[in-house]
Image (cartoon, rainbow, N blue to C red):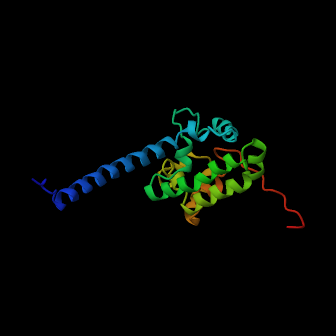
Amino acid sequence: MSEPKASPRRYSRLALGMMFVAGIAFVWLLDFAIVSTNTVEFCTSCHTMSTNFKEYQETLHYRNRSGIQTSCGDCHVPKELVPKLIVKIVAAKDVYHEIIGTIDTPEKFEARRWYLANMVWDRMKAGDSRECRSCHELRHMDLPEQSRSARNRHAAAEENGETCIDCHKGVAHHEPDEPETTDSE
């Protein structure tokens, strides 16, 4: 007696069910990876980032009278999925450079700091400082409560279409000095 053959429909349902489970597992793993790599612990696990962490600890983004604290991901990683994934993929090169030794010491990091900072500033400017604006929105600021200088500059920034990073480059980290150029360059 021969065994009954499984219908193609049964295989299709099984394949569809397996794809569904694999899709859920993929999304869960992706979310886990994103959440795990947004922690201060992960970001400062490289020796060269300890300098940045010390600088950050000296700022109001770390300690302030209201007790609100930002993390590395709050300022460096967009909230929207596609920009977030792009930033994560681009950031993988920093891990790569740490591993191959391009920036694996504070001295090597400092030598490339101007270049690295400008990459972050350019990305933030291109995104209209969206990471800053997730907490700081110009239209919600109480301008009369600000100093006259800040009030005037914020009003002018709004009129001129400027973004946060145009003025606030050294807020959470020391602003690096621009390297001196030589005549041969």
Instruction: Residue at 53%, 39% (x, y): give it.
Output: 39
Instruction: Indicate the position of residue 96 as horizontal and vertical percent values.
Output: 64, 50
Instruction: Residue at 42%, 46% (x, y): give it.
Output: 29
Q: Which of 47 and 140 is in front in this view?
A: 47
Residue furthest right in the image = 183
Specify whether 56 is left or right of 176.
left
Q: Which of 126 and 50 is in front in this view?
A: 50
Pick the quarter of the image with the C terminus.
Answer: bottom right
71 versus 82 height, above or below: above
Instruction: Residue at 67%, 37% (x, y): give it.
Output: 50
Specify whether 109 is left or right of 40.
right
Instruction: Residue at 47%, 43% (x, y): give it.
Output: 35
Query: Quadrant of residue 121 in the image?
Result: bottom right
Residue furthest left in the image = 1
Q: Nearer the viewer, residue 80 or 49?
A: 49
Instruction: Indicate the position of residue 23 as horizontal and vertical percent values.
Output: 34, 52
Q: Which of 61 and 20 is in front in this view?
A: 20
